[in-house]
Image: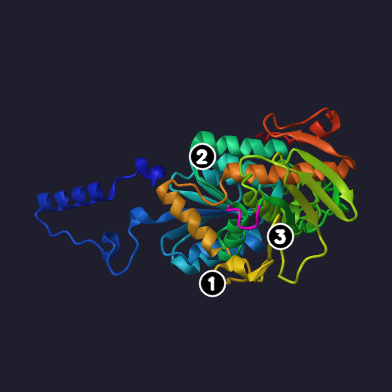
Amino acid sequence: MARRANRIHRRGFLGTVLKAGAALGAPCVLPGRVLGLDGAVLPSETVILGGLGIGGRGNYVLGCFMQEPDVRVVAVCDVRADRRQAVKQRVDARYGGDCAAYRDFREFLARDDLDAVLITTGSNWHALLSIYSAKAGKDVYCEKPCTKTIAESLALAETFERTGRIFQGGMQRRNLPHVQFAVELARTGRLGPLREVHAHPGGLGTGMSGWATPEPEPPVEEVDWDLFLGPAAWRPYNRRFLNSGFEKGGGMVGGGCLEWGSHCVDLCQWANNADDTAPVEYFPIENGQASARYANGVKLVLRNDGWLPLGSCPVRFEGETGWVETGDSAKLALSSPALLAGRKVAEIAGYPATFHVRDFLNCVKTRGKPAVDARTACQSHIACHAANIAIFLGRSLKYDPQKNEFIGDEEANRLRSEAIRAPWHV
């Protein structure tokens, strides 16, 4: 692994140990695990992982990592003492060791033994912690939504491209067979020239994150409220925020199509071969649907209703001669059985993250490109943020994906970013 250049190479280590043993005239006995015997993973092939903000969804994803034989979790960090200790106990039970626990992510990221970090904090922290982690030399697996704004999306992509770190956005459906097959039909022309891609946004209402009734703030050792808010606008403490998916979908123009859109719009981007761009025109809600148009003429439709009963997070791809629709049931609905061409597509229901985690770990080792690298996540999030802005303003917007600005609309351009509370910065 690239990050291990400064570590002692395994062969060099063994050679040093053996020479030392010979010099002392003593036999040298090494544990089998050091040599990779008895099915043990070599230390040089073990990914050393830390977890940031491990709560509800984070506990599931952490479990996916811990079941992999070439992962060892050595540190966790959370602003909440109860979660910090609960996750530490879980990790200790798995590895039989003393997992370090931190309240402040800066101390956590200062560790030089971490190869990668799992980020499942509140959404207000996703982008900045990913960026800080990359600058600290760590690879990152980050839950969605990965960014709050267009500006954060661009900063995320630029940072990972500049630092050469590996980033995997938590849009795990890209590593599931039924989705891969549906996208293949769209990208290879089996549906004819692509005309429309449909995404379930999980809601289309936009708004600010707001305040709640002030409550007495707990001691900082129990809940570090200031660090919990981080880059988000200050507001008084209320325990509801701690478990509410705080600023999920963004702070200024939050919610909207980003809830499921970060999954479903991402898949539509992939189907349209648009991982390096975003739609050029966005339209507000009409007849219960929002929409956008790509430069190649393909229409992106965002709708909550009218889906076949195929499970959550459905997508539909329509071409001139055929269509395919699928969702988290892993079932495929096709305009014609002939589209299967005799293939049997594995049905793995329930959107597990195990394959996505494995893809990330493989890329940590090979320095290859994961399914949802930072640029891919950047562009799919830009599509969602721009759609939210059109919905929020209630008017059509034209967008230049090269300059990353709305054309002739100062109000929309101001919403590409939002103020970040000091001392934090992108």
- Looking at the image, tell me whether mark 2 or mark 3 is earlier in sequence order: 2
Give the residue displayed 16% in from the left and 49% down from the top: 20
Q: Distance between the residues labelled 1 and 3?
A: 20 Å
The residue at which mark 1 appears reads as 344
Q: Which of 147 and 92 is in front in this view?
A: 147
What is the CA distance from the residue labelled 2 to the residue labelled 1?
Answer: 44 Å
Residue 174: x percent and y percent?
Answer: 59, 57
Residue wearing tag 3? 316
Q: What element carries label 1?
A: loop
Q: How many labels does the image show?
A: 3
Specify the principal SS of the magenta part: loop
Badge 3 amino acid: Arg
Q: What stretch is highlighted in magenta?
A: 188-192
As drawn, 15 above or below 62: above
Report which quarter residue 277 is drawn in: top right
**Badge 3: residue crowd in 10 Å (few <14, some 14–19, many ≥20):** many
Answer whether residue 190 is magenta in the image: yes
Amino acid on which disc 2 is placed: Ala
Examine the structure image and report whether residue 181 is included in the region drawn in magenta: no
